[in-house]
Image (tube, grey):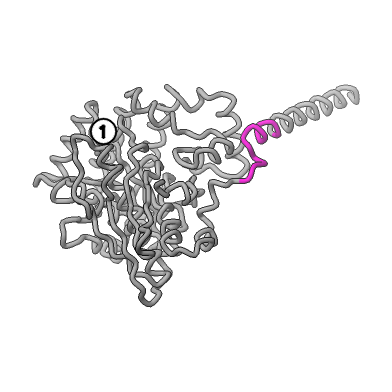
C-alpha cells in the first residue's frame, strides 16, 4: 500500500513538474519577460515628453479606434506656424480586400481627429479642423491622392482648459468584444448618444426593440459567416495577427489575443501556443473562432447603434468617424461599452447580397449606414491594444 502511494506521489510530482516546465516554456516563447513598448502611448505621461502641443495632441489621437487597428495616420507639422499641423491618410495601410473603397480607412481619419479635439480641450486649445483643405481626392488614383492631399488641417487656438471627463475616457479601451448585460439602455443614455446627430447630415440611432435586435443580429451572423468563408479576406486579417510580445513590439498595430479579452498569465499561455502552432489562429481555425466570437457577441447584446449619413462622400466618412469617437468617449462616461460590427457594411463582391438587404432595411432613403455597433454595459473589462509610437506618424 505504501509503495503504491509513493508511486502515485511520484507520478503526480512528475506531472506537476512537466506542467510547470511547459508553462514556463510557453511564457518564454510568448515573450513574457519583454518590456511592452507597444503599450507606452497609453500612459498619460507619454504625451508629456513633447513640448510641441501638436505632438502631445497627436499622441492622444493615435489612441483612437481604427479599421483593423491599422492606425492609418500620418501627420505633417507646419514649419511656418507652430500651431498648425496636417493629417494625411496613410495609403500603405489600406486593407484592400475587406475595405476595397477605403471607406473604413477614411472613417478612421475621423476617429483620430475627434481624439485630437478632445485632447485640445483638456490642454486649453481649440482645434479648428478644416477637412480636405487642398480639395477632394482623385478617386481614379486614390493611393497617390491620399499621399499628396491632407484629410485635415488642424489649427490650435488658445482657450481655457476644459473638462477632463472625455479626455480621461480616451485612455480606456475603445472596443469591448465581450458579453454585455441584458439590461436595456436607459432613456437618458439613449438620448445622450442620439444627441450626437449633427445638423450636417450625420445621424445616430439606437435600436433595442426585440424585433430589431433579432433582425440586426441575424445580419451580423450571416455576414460573419460569409466573411469567414472568403479566404483572401481572412488571410488579410491573418497577416496582421501578432502572436507574441516580440511581434507586438515590432509592429505595434494589427490584431492580437488581447482583442478577445485575454490578459494576464492566460494571455502568455495562449500566445506561446499560437507562436508554436500558428495553425491555431489561421485558416479554418481562425474562421471558426471568428464565427463563434460573433455569435457570442450577438447573443449578449442589449442594443445596437447605427451612424448614418445622407451621402457617402469622403467628407461624410470622416465626419462619421468623428461621431463614432465621440460616442465611444461619451459612452465611457455613461458606463457603456461598444464594439463595431462592420462585416455587413463591407463592400467586396461576396458581401453584396446582405449589404444590399441591410441598406434597404436601414437606409431606404438612399443614405449610407457608415457604422453598425453593439452597445451595452460590459460584464468585464478588457485589455488595451497595441499602439504605434507617435514619432512614426510624422511624414518625412
Task: Using the rendered view, name the quadrant where residue 267 is placed.
Answer: top right
x and y, in percent, of residue 373 in the image? 31, 47
What span is in magenta? 24-35
Instruction: Pick whichever, 354 or 217, lies toward us.
Output: 354
Vertical comparison of 343 with 383: above or below: above
Q: Is residue 208 magenta?
A: no
Q: Find residue 215 and report its image quarter.
A: top left
Look at 38% across and 42% down and name the residue there. Answer: 297
Q: Which residue is mark 1?
A: 100
> Which one is nearer the viewer's eye here, 13 or 122?
122
Q: Nearer the viewer, residue 114 or 250?
A: 250
**Whole-percent x, y for residue 197 in the image:** 21, 60
- In the image, 95 versus 152, the foreground residue is 152
Q: Residue at x 38, y 29 (%)?
A: 236
State the residue at coordinates (61%, 35%). 30
**Residue 381's spot in the image, x, y percent?**
49, 52
Q: Decide if residue 156 is on the left or right side of residue 263.
A: left
Q: Quadrant of the N terminus?
A: top right
Q: Residue furthest front?
A: 80
Q: Which quadrant holds residue 23?
A: top right
Amino acid at each position: 500500500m505504501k509503495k503504491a502511494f509513493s508511486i502515485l506521489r511520484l507520478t503526480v510530482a512528475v506531472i506537476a513538474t512537466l506542467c510547470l516546465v511547459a508553462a514556463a516554456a510557453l511564457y518564454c516563447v510568448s515573450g513574457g519577460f519583454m518590456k511592452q513598448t507597444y503599450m507606452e502611448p497609453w500612459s498619460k505621461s507619454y504625451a508629456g515628453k513633447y513640448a510641441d502641443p501638436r505632438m502631445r495632441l497627436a499622441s492622444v489621437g493615435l489612441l483612437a479606434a481604427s479599421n483593423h487597428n491599422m492606425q492609418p495616420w500620418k501627420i505633417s507639422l507646419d514649419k511656418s506656424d507652430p500651431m498648425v499641423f496636417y493629417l494625411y491618410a496613410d495609403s500603405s495601410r489600406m486593407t484592400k480586400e475587406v475595405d476595397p473603397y477605403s471607406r473604413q480607412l477614411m472613417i478612421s481619419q475621423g476617429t483620430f481627429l475627434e481624439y485630437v479635439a478632445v485632447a485640445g480641450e483638456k490642454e486649453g486649445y481649440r482645434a479648428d479642423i478644416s477637412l480636405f483643405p487642398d480639395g477632394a481626392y482623385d478617386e481614379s488614383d486614390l493611393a497617390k491622392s491620399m499621399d499628396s492631399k491632407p484629410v485635415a488641417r488642424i489649427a490650435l487656438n488658445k482657450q481655457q482648459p476644459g473638462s477632463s471627463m472625455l479626455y480621461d475616457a480616451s485612455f480606456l479601451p475603445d472596443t469591448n468584444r465581450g458579453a454585455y448585460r441584458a439590461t436595456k439602455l436607459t432613456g437618458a443614455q439613449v438620448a445622450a448618444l442620439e444627441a450626437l446627430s449633427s445638423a450636417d447630415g450625420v445621424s445616430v440611432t439606437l435600436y433595442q426593440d426585440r424585433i430589431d435586435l433579432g433582425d440586426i443580429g441575424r445580419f451580423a451572423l450571416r455576414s460573419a459567416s460569409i466573411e469567414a468563408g472568403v479566404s483572401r479576406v481572412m488571410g488579410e486579417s491573418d497577416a496582421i495577427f501578432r502572436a507574441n510580445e516580440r511581434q507586438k513590439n515590432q509592429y505595434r498595430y494589427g490584431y492580437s489575443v488581447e482583442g478577445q479579452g485575454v490578459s494576464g498569465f492566460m494571455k502568455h499561455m495562449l500566445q506561446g501556443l499560437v507562436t508554436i502552432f500558428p495553425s491555431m489562429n489561421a485558416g479554418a481555425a481562425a474562421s471558426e473562432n471568428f464565427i463563434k466570437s460573433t455569435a457570442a457577441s450577438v447573443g449578449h447584446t442589449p442594443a445596437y447603434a447605427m451612424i448614418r449619413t445622407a451621402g457617402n462622400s469622403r467628407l461624410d466618412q470622416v465626419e462619421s468617424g468623428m461621431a463614432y469617437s465621440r460616442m465611444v468617449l461619451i459612452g465611457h462616461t455613461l458606463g457603456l461599452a461598444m464594439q463595431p460590427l462592420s462585416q455587413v457594411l463591407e463592400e467586396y463582391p461576396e458581401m453584396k447580397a446582405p449589404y444590399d438587404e441591410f441598406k434597404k432595411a436601414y437606409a431606404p432613403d438612399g443614405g449610407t449606414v457608415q457604422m453598425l455597433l453593439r452597445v451595452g454595459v460590459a460584464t468585464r473589462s478588457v485589455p488595451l491594444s497595441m499602439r504605434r509610437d507617435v514619432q512614426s506618424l510624422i511624414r518625412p
